[in-house]
Image: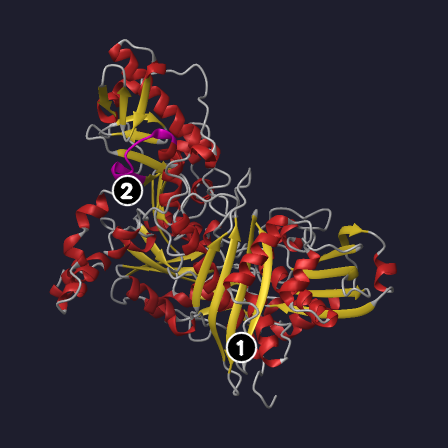
């Protein structure tokens, strides 16, 4: 190894951050916090019975120094679940939060022990709302076993003992024992039944703002993402698949790159070919110089312009009725008609960390290192690709540099396993940004037609909604959707909260060769844009503003009204704005959570849009960590704002045009508004999700604000394609 290669090996991401932050006499973060980071988040996979400490149950291990390790079965991709889920366990356990560490649960153990972790897939804003009760139960189970262990040692009744901050207390005698002293005995206790769990009025930790456990290690580059993985004897791979989805390789000329420095092998993969080398750059450059002839298939003649026309035409064709209440035909003929057509494009997920996977396939054994939203599904996928039993696969889940749904299906894993199986070494496969953008599984394209009639009071006498949209289930091969109605296709439409004497929602599932998949907030993303834009059109036709009109349509729904009224108050809804400025409002319920947003923006005479302020009001019932809940709304607003202003994937000659952030723009710091989030919690039995519901309202709120500023109605995204200049 020459001097340059040695330096490259030493200068990894973590060391670069540590050095660069101190080189100019600045923030010496790398030299201050590394030990602290290890006390917050640790990587100890695979699960090993010989590790220090005593495991009380599959979720909890207590070390002799009272450190409490709480395992997290969901994937941390920025949403804060590496803090919120341990908080749920700790609430019942009664431990000292300062002593808590988090680590990933093992998918292999989950398989081996009959789904001991219940739910490992992360998506649908379900980490808290679908896991809370069994996580509370895990904490309560461990607490009661610790108490029983202490009571047995003292020869007292468990009922005479209590817990406080990581200790079991016996008030009558003043004695106490630390959890670390009791863990070994508690691990042997068998309970007769499941202990009761707390109700929200008994919480002491849940509901309080708590600093995230994963922030310090991420600040100093100590957190391990998939792209950080380095293994002994590891090689690197770059892969190319047909630019047109569904195409195949006709031929390639391996001799063209034979003898290039560092190149190890050329490996056929499904739909393409990969080059393996001792450095990723060498693999990437060799691949770029490998002559490949593609069989692009019949889809090579398709374009987005054609798709636009096809989706609109599909609205006049056969459909399946997803919902019908009242006499819609009679209602539509009984008042003032308002019709509109809304369109939404394909969108990429565009996670900041492009897809990657490190795989090591040996005789009868497969190890995987990656960030995945579905570690248990990834395990099955790896087993199938390698041709081994699932019991012989180990998944080392890493932090995810963004997922948004894309990392729920791991195409990169199959490629990495295929390559490692051929070369017999650990292989790190990295998709370039262009690979990631052009071989995504996209948010479906949609066309949505609305018809409504208004009575003399300005309220609807009937509403008819008809959507043509790609089927995610069919695209993923999950089924034919026999009844023709996919829940995600009509979510937010079939269950719209607004009252109308007659309502009909029709669904046309229409797929192209472009693969589609879950995108942050799924069908609510395009359906909220369309519905909330159309509700504003009805308000305009009725001569009312958007807030007051929605208030009339939501009478009898106190949770929605609380969110709306909070928005109006906190956003200064009735405060006059200068010329060229406007406010817009939108409200939507998804994943059990109501989110309303008011956007305040300005439009310059040249048509430049500047979103100045976003006010959000949120009702998710209860919240575990208000700090991360607010962060998630802010994240969702920026993600949705990027899509509204700039986002579109276009197809030309069957292939995706966009390749990087120069032509698939996202909101930069200069585009990011001031965001104010207000939690309007209704409590009760409601536990809504928080990761996705902030996305749907932002696009319609922006478009409604643009209308109020300019008088121009936007019915097709992205906004960048609309001429908003004063002379237009």
Task: Please identify the quarter of the rendering in which residue 443 is found.
Answer: bottom right
Spatial CA distance of label 2 from label 1 is: 52 Å
Which quadrant is the N terminus positioned in? bottom left
Instruction: Give the residues drawn in magenta, as a range.
Output: 92-102
**What residue sits 40% from the left and 71% below the top?**
668
Residue on which the image places disc 2: 43
Of circles 2 and 1, the one toward us is 1
Task: Please identify the quarter of the rendering in which residue 682 is found.
Answer: top right
Residue on which the image places disc 1: 577
Q: Along the polypeptide, which appears first: circle 2 or circle 1?
A: 2
User: Residue 377 appears at what percent x and percent y?
Assistant: 47, 42
In the visual, does 24 lie left or right of 156?
left
Nearest the viewer among 278 and 568 is: 568
User: Residue 406 appears at what percent x and percent y?
Assistant: 48, 55
User: Residue 31 appears at what percent x and percent y?
Assistant: 14, 55
Q: Residue furthest top?
A: 155
User: Residue 694 appears at what percent x and percent y?
Assistant: 51, 57
């Amino acid at each position: 190894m020459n001097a340059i290669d040695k330096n490259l090996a030493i200068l990894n991401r973590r060391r670069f951050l540590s050095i660069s932050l101190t080189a100019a006499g600045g923030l010496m973060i790398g030299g201050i916090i590394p030990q602290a980071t290890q006390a917050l988040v640790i990587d100890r996979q695979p699960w090993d019975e010989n590790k220090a400490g005593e495991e009380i149950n599959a979720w909890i291990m207590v070390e002799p120094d009272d450190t409490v390790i709480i395992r997290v079965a969901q994937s941390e991709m920025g949403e804060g679940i590496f803090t919120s889920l341990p908080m749920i366990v700790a609430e019942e356990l009664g431990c000292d939060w300062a002593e808590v560490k988090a680590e990933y649960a093992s998918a292999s153990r989950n398989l081996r022990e009959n789904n001991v972790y219940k739910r490992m897939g992360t998506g649908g804003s379900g980490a808290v709302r679908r896991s809370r009760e069994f996580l509370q139960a895990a904490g309560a189970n461990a607490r009661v076993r610790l108490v029983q262990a202490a009571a047995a040692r003292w020869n007292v009744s468990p009922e005479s003992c209590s817990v406080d901050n990581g200790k079991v207390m016996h008030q009558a005698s003043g004695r106490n024992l630390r959890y670390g002293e009791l863990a070994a005995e508690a691990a042997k206790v068998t309970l007769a039944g499941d202990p009761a769990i707390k109700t929200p009025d008994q919480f002491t930790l849940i509901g309080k703002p708590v600093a995230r456990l994963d922030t310090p290690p991420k600040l100093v580059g100590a957190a391990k993402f998939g792209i950080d993985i380095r293994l002994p004897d590891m090689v690197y791979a770059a892969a190319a698949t047909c630019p047109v989805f569904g195409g195949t390789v006709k031929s390639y000329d391996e001799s063209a790159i034979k003898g290039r420095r560092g190149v190890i092998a050329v490996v056929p993969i499904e739909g393409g070919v990969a080059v393996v080398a001792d450095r990723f750059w060498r693999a990437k450059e060799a691949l770029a110089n490998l002559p490949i002839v593609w069989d692009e298939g019949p889809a090579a003649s398709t374009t987005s312009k054609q798709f636009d026309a096809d989706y609109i035409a599909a609205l006049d064709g056969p459909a399946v009725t997803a919902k019908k209440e009242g006499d819609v035909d009679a209602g539509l003929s009984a008042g003032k008609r308002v019709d509109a057509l809304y369109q939404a494009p394909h969108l990429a997920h565009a996670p900041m960390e492009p897809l990657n996977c490190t795989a090591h396939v040996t005789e009868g054994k497969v190890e995987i290192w990656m960030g995945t939203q579905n570690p248990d599904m990834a395990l099955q996928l790896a087993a199938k690709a390698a041709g081994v039993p699932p019991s012989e696969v180990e998944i080392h889940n890493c932090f995810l540099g963004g997922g948004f749904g894309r990392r729920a299906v791991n195409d990169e894993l199959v490629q990495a396993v295929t390559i490692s199986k051929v070369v017999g070494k650990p292989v790190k496969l990295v998709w370039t940004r262009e690979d990631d953008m052009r071989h995504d599984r996209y948010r479906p394209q949609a066309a949505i037609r609305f018809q409504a009639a208004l009575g003399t009071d300005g309220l609807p006498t009937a509403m008819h909604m008809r959507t043509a949209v790609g089927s995610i289930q069919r695209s993923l091969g999950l089924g034919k959707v026999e009844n023709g109605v996919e829940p995600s296709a009509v979510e937010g439409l079939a269950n719209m909260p607004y009252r109308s004497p007659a309502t009909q929602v029709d669904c046309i599932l229409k797929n192209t060769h472009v693969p589609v998949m879950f995108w942050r907030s799924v069908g609510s993303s395009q359906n909220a844009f369309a519905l909330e834009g159309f509700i504003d059109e009805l308000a305009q036709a009725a001569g009312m503003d958007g807030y007051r009109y929605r208030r009339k349509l939501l009478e009898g729904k106190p949770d929605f009204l609380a969110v709306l009224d909070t928005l109006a108050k906190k956003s200064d809804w009735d405060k006059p704005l200068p010329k060229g400025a406007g406010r817009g409002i939108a409200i939507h319920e998804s994943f059990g959570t109501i989110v309303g947003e008011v956007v305040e923006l300005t439009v310059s005479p040249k048509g430049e849009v500047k979103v100045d302020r976003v006010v959000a009001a949120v009702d998710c019932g209860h919240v575990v960590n208000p700090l991360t809940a607010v962060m998630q709304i802010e994240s969702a607003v920026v993600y949705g704002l990027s899509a509204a202003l700039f986002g579109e994937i276009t197809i030309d000659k069957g292939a995706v045009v966009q390749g990087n952030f120069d032509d698939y723009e996202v909101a930069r710091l200069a585009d990011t508004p001031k965001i104010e989030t207000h939690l309007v919690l209704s409590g009760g039995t409601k536990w809504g999700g928080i990761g996705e519901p902030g996305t749907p309202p932002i696009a319609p709120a922006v478009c409604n604000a643009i209308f109020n500023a300019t008088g121009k109605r936007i019915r097709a995204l992205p906004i960048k394609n609309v001429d908003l200049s004063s002379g237009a």
